[in-house]
């Protein structure tokens, strides 16, 4: 039998505290005092644009596939932002190096590449909409079939889940889309 005796009165008195921190309360259930609490710690590392580019140009983006973060610097250096991303599922699908944003589109449509169809013959063209894997906005890179885009499937962010692209939450890609000019230099590391 447990050392702790819970009465109806003590349970009711604790409900307001539980409603303020349900995640913390649930994390404690079934954990002994000696067990460490498993906390998710962000792997984001701040980047310095000077480590990647000679100058900021129109703007600069570094997509870090290890920490799964996209770093953005405005051309005047006044703004630095970090966004969580999804990254390619394997190193074979990951293209690394320098490119640039060559085109932007709100409400992109999607056509699977030949290699995607080879892996999954059921893939077909998708018009813009809630099932489209490119989400609400897309920024096309100088490499064919590589994009920075949104996703409707929020479970993908922070994971290896793409066929080569860098994915962001739809809210994040909308913000990035707004501040990123065509011609922004991009480095995928």
Image (spheres, rainbow, N blue to C red):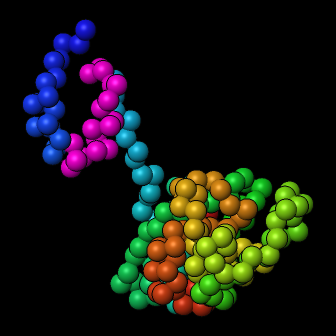
Q: Give the percent coordinates (x, y) of residue 129.
A: 63, 78
Front one among 116 and 78: 116
Query: Is the residue 74 above or below the residue 63 in the image?
Result: below
> Could you say which quadrant of the image residue 117 lies in?
bottom right
Query: Is the residue 149 above or below the residue 6 in the image?
Result: below
Q: Residue furthest top?
A: 1
Residue range highlighted in magenta? 18-34
Residue located at (74% from left, 76% from top): 126
Residue 169 visible in the picture? yes
Residue 98 visible in the picture? no
Q: Give the percent coordinates (x, y) of residue 19.
A: 22, 47
Q: Give the percent coordinates (x, y) of residue 172.
A: 47, 73
Query: Is the residue 36 above or below the residue 51 in the image?
Result: above
Q: Give the percent coordinates (x, y) of residue 98.
A: 66, 74
> Is residue 180 in the magenta section?
no
Residue located at (44% from left, 58% from top): 45
Residue located at (58% from left, 53% from top): 159
> Left or right: where does residue 9 sit relative to residue 50?
left
> Left or right: where does residue 134 sit relative to residue 56?
right
Query: Is the residue 16 above or below the residue 61 in the image?
Result: above
> Left or right: where does residue 183 sit relative to residue 76?
right
Front one among 56 and 24: 24
Front one among 121 and 188: 121
Q: Quadrant of the C terminus?
A: bottom right
Residue located at (62% from left, 60% from top): 87
């Amino acid at each position: 039998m447990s050392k702790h005796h819970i009465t109806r009165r003590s349970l009711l008195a604790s409900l307001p505290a539980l409603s303020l921190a349900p995640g913390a309360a649930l994390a404690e259930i079934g954990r002994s005092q000696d067990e460490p609490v498993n906390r998710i710690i962000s792997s984001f590392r701040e980047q310095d644009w000077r480590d990647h580019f000679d100058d900021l140009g129109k703007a600069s983006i570094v997509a870090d596939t290890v920490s799964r973060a996209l770093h953005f610097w405005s051309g005047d250096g006044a703004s630095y932002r970090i966004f969580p991303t999804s990254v390619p599922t394997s190193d074979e699908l990951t293209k690394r190096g320098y490119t640039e944003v060559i085109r932007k589109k709100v409400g992109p449509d999607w056509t699977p590449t030949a290699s995607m169809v080879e892996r999954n013959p059921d893939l077909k063209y998708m018009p813009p909409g809630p099932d489209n894997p490119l989400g609400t906005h897309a920024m096309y890179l100088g490499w064919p079939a590589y994009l920075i885009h949104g996703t409707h499937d929020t479970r993908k962010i922070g994971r290896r889940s793409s066929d080569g692209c860098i994915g962001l939450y739809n809210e994040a890609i909308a913000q990035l889309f707004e501040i990123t000019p065509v011609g922004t230099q991009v480095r995928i590391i």
